[in-house]
């Protein structure tokens, strides 16, 4: 990735890449999920509650990562389990609550983010039906260059996986095989425990490799099967930023499709960005060049035009944009309108209220039915602390006004254009806070003549 950020912490549609397979495993019904990390534990702060973390003391390969992950599983509650992550060690004896020998243990990769809960469930189901000790997920590619080829025997079982990274690794016939290893597996827990201590680092890299487990299980007379994942997109790996961009496009396409299937109109999906945790109600329209980030919630019947939204809430019937910026903590209640070139931050805009254009509303509460004129500014920061502005119901704000917090404007008040409000305004009052105009006759002519 050419980055100081660990690969699996790179963002994919609003969340770190590693959380995609973690969420898929949980949705598939895994009773426990363990993520394998490096000694620096960079993943610790992003994992959901209840997801375990195992540490791989040294970067000794994918097999070493599974050693660490299995030790963590065996030290805690067991059941249908999933391992995943970037890297990981440990050799603790199984506890009384460790997974039973016939429990399925699924191995996922933190850099294969699009694997779905359905694909995981189908893999486990196929594994159980076959009676195999291990089942690998494979897929068929038009161009399998660079991938390990799955070689099957006469019974259709996996005989071996042939790597193709260097010339001579595979025969001409093996290179013609289009079925490839995805790096996703399910093992019987007992078979996995038995094979892990026998992994060897007898290779050029001196690392423990996960595929060797398949050879060890076959050598003991165990069956190894391959389950073909029909949709190759679900098992695409990310090794660089080019691949991340390709996977992001697929993830975004899936997010858009889910919203549209639920009744949301996305006018131009190719010109729209929506994060995975965004919620949008039916009959809402998202117009082109809109970005919706984080945990934004949008109700039904809203219209969002060419705007940027992040971690905000829009109730039903809200209109936004074009060119609005809704920052975290912005709440637009039913029927509210935020118009062109308006920025709202940590503010509650009441039902039916309007902030039509060219305004900044920060740390404010705006009452129901209020209409703020163009170029309304809430001056919420005094250089040291943030302060709130409270604007009542049915207020009419003139253009080019500033409200210097902390300040309260009562219900039904009117603010004259060009005012700088520094004191509270009573309900139904007219507030005028500007210098009286003075005209100087002949000023322009005197300036030209110097007299």
Image (tube, helix red, strand yellow):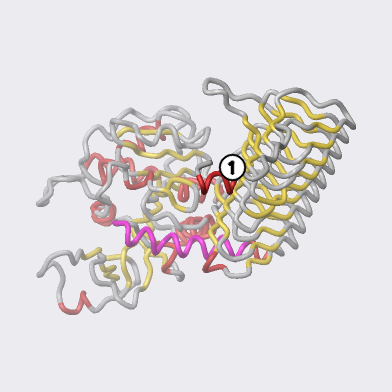
Question: Is 85 displayed left or right of 398 in the figure?
Answer: left
| Front residue of 33 and 9 | 9
Q: Quadrant of residue 281?
A: bottom right
| Front residue of 382 and 92 | 382
Circle 1: element type: loop
Residue 193, percent from left and from top: 33, 40
Residue 399, percent from left and from top: 72, 45
Quickly name the residue at label 1: 327
**In the image, residue 250 above or below residue 438:** below
Q: Is residue 34 visible?
A: yes
Among all residues in the image, which is located at the extreme top?
384
**In the image, residue 333 above or below residue 119:** above
Answer few, some or many: residues within 10 Å of disc 1's Cα (few below 14, many 20 plus, some between 14 and 19).
many
Tell me what residue is drawn at x 78 percent, y 51 percent.
316
**In the image, residue 262 above or below residue 73:** below
Does residue 334 show up magenta in the picture?
no
Residue 116, percent from left and from top: 50, 57
Question: Is 374 displayed left or right of 288 in the figure?
Answer: right
Tell me what residue is drawn at x 79 percent, y 36 percent.
415
Residue 431, percent from left and from top: 80, 31
Question: Is 247 displayed left or right of 63 in the figure?
Answer: right
From which residue to which does the magenta span run?
A: 240-258
Tell me what residue is drawn at x 41 percent, y 32 percent.
44
Numbered circles on residues, count? 1
Q: Is residue 223 visible?
A: no
Magenta span main SS: helix
Does residue 242 show up magenta in the picture?
yes
């Amino acid at each position: 990735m050419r980055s100081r950020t660990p690969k699996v912490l790179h963002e994919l549609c609003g969340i770190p890449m590693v959380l995609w397979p973690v969420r898929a495993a949980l949705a598939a019904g895994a009773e426990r999920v363990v993520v394998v990390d490096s000694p620096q534990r960079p993943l610790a702060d992003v994992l959901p509650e209840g997801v375990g973390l195992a540490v791989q003391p040294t970067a000794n390969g994918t097999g070493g990562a599974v050693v660490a992950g299995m030790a963590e599983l065996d030290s805690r509650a067991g059941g249908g389990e999933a391992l995943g992550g970037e890297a990981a060690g440990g050799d603790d004896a199984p506890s009384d609550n460790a997974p039973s020998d016939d429990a399925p243990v699924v191995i996922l990769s933190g850099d294969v983010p699009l694997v779905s809960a359905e694909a995981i469930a189908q893999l486990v189901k196929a594994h159980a039906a076959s009676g195999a000790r291990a089942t690998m997920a494979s897929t068929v590619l038009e161009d399998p260059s660079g991938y390990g080829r799955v070689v099957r025997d006469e019974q259709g079982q996996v005989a071996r996986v042939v790597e193709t990274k260097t010339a001579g690794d595979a025969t001409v016939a093996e290179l013609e095989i289009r079925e490839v290893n995805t790096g996703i597996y399910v093992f019987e827990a007992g078979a996995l425990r038995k094979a892990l201590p026998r992994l060897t680092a007898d290779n050029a890299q001196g690392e423990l490799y996960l595929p060797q487990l398949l050879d060890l299980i076959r050598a003991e007379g165990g069956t190894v099967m391959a389950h073909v994942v029909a949709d190759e997109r679900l098992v695409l790996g990310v090794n660089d930023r080019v691949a991340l961009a390709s996977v992001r496009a697929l993830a975004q396409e899936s997010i858009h499709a889910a919203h549209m299937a639920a009744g949301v109109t996305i006018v131009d999906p190719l010109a729209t960005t929506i994060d995975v945790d965004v919620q949008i109600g039916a009959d809402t329209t998202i117009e082109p060049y809109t970005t919706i980030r984080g945990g934004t919630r949008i109700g039904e019947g809203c219209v969002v035009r060419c705007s940027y939204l992040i971690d905000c809430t829009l109730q039903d019937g809200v209109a936004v944009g074009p060119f609005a910026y809704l920052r975290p903590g912005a709440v637009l209640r039913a029927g509210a309108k935020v118009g062109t070139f308006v920025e709202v931050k940590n503010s509650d805009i009441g039902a039916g209220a309007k902030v039509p254009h060219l305004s900044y509303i920060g740390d404010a509460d705006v009452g129901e039915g209020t209409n703020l004129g163009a170029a309304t500014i809430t001056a919420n920061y005094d250089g040291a602390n943030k302060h709130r502005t409270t604007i009542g119901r049915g207020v009419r704000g003139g253009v080019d006004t500033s409200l210097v917090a902390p300040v309260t404007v009562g219900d039904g008040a009117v603010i004259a254009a060009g005012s700088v409000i520094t004191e509270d305004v009573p309900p139904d009052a007219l507030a005028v806070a500007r210098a009286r105009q003075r005209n100087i006759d002949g000023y322009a002519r005197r300036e030209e003549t110097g007299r």
